[in-house]
Image: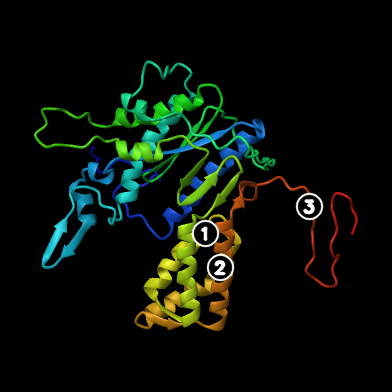
Amino acid sequence: MTHDQSFPGPSGTSVNSRVDSTVLPPIMYSFVLLRTIHYIVGVWTRHPITKIFLCKFDINAAYRRCTLSDRTAFKSMTIFGHFLLVALHLTFGGSPGPELWGVISETITDVGNSLLQNDHWNQNELFDPISDELDNPSSLPPDIPFAQARSMSVNIPSNDKGKVDIFIDDSIGVAPDIGDVPKRYLRVIPLAIRTLSRPLSPEDIIPRKDIISIKKLHAEGQLCETKTVLGWDINTRSLLISLPTHKAQQWINEKNSIIESGKTNHKVLEAMLGRLNHVACIFPPMRHFMGRLYKALYRAKARKGWTVLTPTELQDLGINLEFIQLAQSGVSLNNITYRRPTHIFRSDACEFGMGEYNPISGKA
C-alpha cells in the first residue's frame, strides 16, 4: 500500500500535515465511543429484547504495510546513537502515522458499511474464505435479563443492518441479532480488508504475512454480547460500560502512591492525566477537577521535572480516584447518551431573584 503525498487526509488536510497528538486523538476517540454507544441504545429502543453482538477486526502489522513518500519519511526520523534513521514505512511514534493510516482504515470502514446496507450483496457468494474461520456468535446465559433502553433527545438514524466504526486501527463492529445480520457482519470486514490489500503471491521472493491475522481474528473477531472496545468493557445485554478491573486497580494504586508521597514528576503526571482523560470520556464532569493537575504538570516541567502537590491538587486527585472506582463498577449506557429529559427546572443564582420553578407546571 502506498500513499501519494498530496492525498487528502480524513480531516480534510494533507497527509503531510502534522497531527497534534495531544488534541485530535482524544477528541476523535470520544466521538467514536459515543457513536458506538448511541447506536447500541438506538437499536435497543426499537428492539428491546434483541441480542446485540460486538466484535473487532485487526490488520496484521498495519502501519508497516504503508510505504512513505520521501517528504513524509523525513517526519518519521529517529536518532539512535550517532545515526539518524529514516523510516520508509509508517511508525507508531511518527506524528504523521495516525492521519496517514486513517485514510486506509476509514476507507475499509466505508466499504464495510456500504456493503452492509446494500441488499444486492450476497454474503454467500461474494466473501473472503478466511471469514469461515469464525465461530457462531457467543451469547450470554439466558437467565441474564435485558436492560431497558431510555429514549434519547437526538435522532439516531434507524439502521438495523449493523454498523462499523473505526479509531485509527481499531475496527469496532455492532451487529443486532436480526435475520442474517450476524452472518453478513462476520463476512463484510474481511472482504473489505481483502478488497483494498495486495494479494499474496507464492512467487514473491520476500515472504509476507497475510494482512488478516488469524490469531487476532479468533481472539477479537468473534461476535459476543460482551467485548473490550477502545479500552472499555461493554455489556450490551445489561447496557453497561466499565473500566477493566486490572486497568482500574493499576491506576488506583498509582494514584494512591502519589497521594501518599505528596509529590511526583512530570512524566508520571503526564501519563496520569492521559489516563484520567480516558475515564473522562464517560464522566465529562471530572475534567473540572483536572485543571489544577495540569497546572501542576506545567510547574513540574518548569522545575526540572519534580513538584510537590498542593493540598487542593491532592484533593482533586482524590476526587478523580473516586471517578475511577465508579468507572470500574460500571455505568449504564443510558447515562452516557443524550437523554430526553423527564423534568425541566430553571434556577436563579441570585438570592433576590425568582428562585426555582418548573416551566411546565408553573409551580415554584
Q: Nearer the viewer, residue 326 or 346?
A: 326
The amino acid sitting under disc 1 is Val
Does residue 9 appear to the left or right of 313 in the view shown?
Answer: left
Residue at screen point 43% across, 72% down: 269
**3D distance between C-alphas at marks 2 and 1:** 9 Å
**3D distance between C-alphas at marks 1 and 3:** 28 Å
Q: Please provide percent x and percent y for residue 202.
A: 14, 27
The amino acid sitting under disc 2 is Asn
Q: Nearer the viewer, residue 219 or 207?
A: 219
Q: What mark, if any, has residue 279 been given in the picture?
A: 1
Q: Please provide percent x and percent y for residue 34.
A: 54, 46
Mark 2 touching mark 1, by CB under 8 A?
yes
Question: Which comes before the other along the chain, label 2 or label 3?
Answer: 2
The amino acid sitting under disc 3 is Ile
Furthest toward the right, the residue is 363
The residue where tag 2 is placed is 320
- For marks 2 and 3, give the one nearer the viewer: 2
Question: Which comes before the other along the chain, label 2 or label 1?
Answer: 1
Q: Please provide percent x and percent y for residue 134.
A: 38, 30
Residue at screen point 69% across, 42% down: 150
The residue where tag 3 is placed is 344
Location of the N terminus (image quadrant): top left
Furthest toward the left, the residue is 205
Callout 1 crowding tier (Cα within 10 Å): few <14, some 14–19, many ≥20: many
Could you tell me if residue 341 is visible in this image?
Answer: yes
Does residue 363 appear to the left or right of 248 in the view shown?
Answer: right
